[in-house]
Image (cartoon, grey):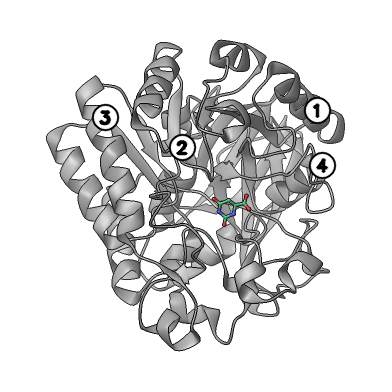
Amino acid sequence: MLRITNAAYLGELRDVLVENGHIAGFGPAGSLHGENTFDAKGRKLFPGFTDAHTHLREPGGEWKETIASGLDAAAHGGFVSVMCMGNTNPVNEEAGVTRQMLDSASASWPHGPRLYPIGAATVGLKGEELTRMHELKKAGCVAISNDGKPVANTEIFRRVMEYAADLGMIVIDHCEDPFLAVNTHMNEGITSGILGLRGQPDVAETIQAARSIFLAEYLNIPVHIAHVSARKTVDLIAWAKQRGVKVTAETTPHYLLLDETAVGLYDTNAKVNPPLRTQADIASLREAVKSGVIDILVTDHAPHAVHEKEVPFDRAPNGFTGMDLAVSLTYDLVRQNVLSEEDLIRLWAVRPAEIFGLPCNQFRIGDPADFFLFDPEEEWTVSRETLHSKSCNTPWLGQKLCGRVSNLWIGGYQIF
Ligand code: DOR
């Protein structure tokens, strides 16, 4: 039996006992006994986190990321469960692709992090023909999404929602009006005007979210709004929740921390979709994660190679890597008193597992022994060398962060 001792959990020093992959005891430091002891002095204890929105690029984009390298980044970021989007090549629209993803995960990381693929809503993500979702579910998909290509035809989107709901799967909707957002490169506002870049108005997101929310209410089935970036979308979700609509929502650390000015002088590492918005949006999103209007945090980990980002801004692909950094970045919000450690556990572990029906350790006897230690004092610089992802397209590249995941156990197995 393994005993972790002196681990700081929500401000109190704790012992954790692990037996056969599960939590066998949890109590004040020094109160429990095990054969092997791991002293966690100076480190914080968290349950394993879930990242419900990532892009792992395998199959078809292995120069950006593989499932092996993506799960490496996940493990070193404290994630024990990773949901990956279906915008691969081929698209994850058939059971064979799902199985290939799962085989690749278990071959490279037999002890976890666990991979949970998200199936495509329509064939080729073209928004025309529904996929065979029952087969995707049987093969291991846990949710459905048309990912970065919102279904333009509302009738088809309605059928997607109904079919997925019949199978007990939630639709994750990337909300972006396909016409307002076309050929846009950043948030529409003063900064886009100064830079001479075509901007995307915040209402491109809100209008599309309104469609999902009204359909969810009309059909009385759930919908999950992906990576919320705009205050108006937050207001809409709050209103819908008050009406009893079965809507849940996510945002990412970057929308809580960076505004449109991060683009600087055309820094393609600050180009993401939806785009970074304004200080008013940041303030509203911070309130929403605190109050629960936004249910969960995700990274939207979207790796791209250096040569793909080293092009003129309007030609660069959208996206940031995120799994390596997420806990360090969000722990900074604890230091700023925006969130508490308890909020991090709710946003990164408890609620994502509830929404998508995944395992979650809450340190109750019998829970999966999935947890990590976090050294709040470790200073490190975000660089090619320190990141485990195959790509390093993050606006934090070159910056110093304080606090880092130091050890991870999944199902009682120490990954590092
Ligand atoms: O910035 C983004 N990158 N947003 C998306 O929705 C897709 C993602 C990607 O796959 O690169």
* Labelled disc at residue 352: 2
Disc 1 + disc 3, Cβ < 8 Å: no
Residue at mark 3 = 215
| Mark closer to the chain start, 1 or 4 | 4
- Tell me which amino acid carries mark 4: Ala
At x 78% / y 68%, what residue is drawn? 306
- Does the beta carbon at disc 3 come under 8 Å from ligand 1? no
Look at the picture and state if 62 lies above or below 166.
below
Say what secondary structure mark 4 lies in.
helix
| Amino acid type assigned to the residue bearing label 1 in the image | Ser
Q: Residue at x 70, y 46 (%)?
A: 408
Q: Position of residue 261 (x, y in %)?
A: 46, 82
Mark 3: amino acid:
Leu
Label 4 neighbour load within 10 Å: few <14, some 14-19, many 20+ = many
Q: Position of residue 84 (x, y in %)?
A: 63, 38
- Crowding at label 2, few (<14), some or many (≥20) Cα neighbours within 10 Å? many
Residue named by callout 1: 106
Say left or right for 38 vs 353: right
Residue of label 4: 68
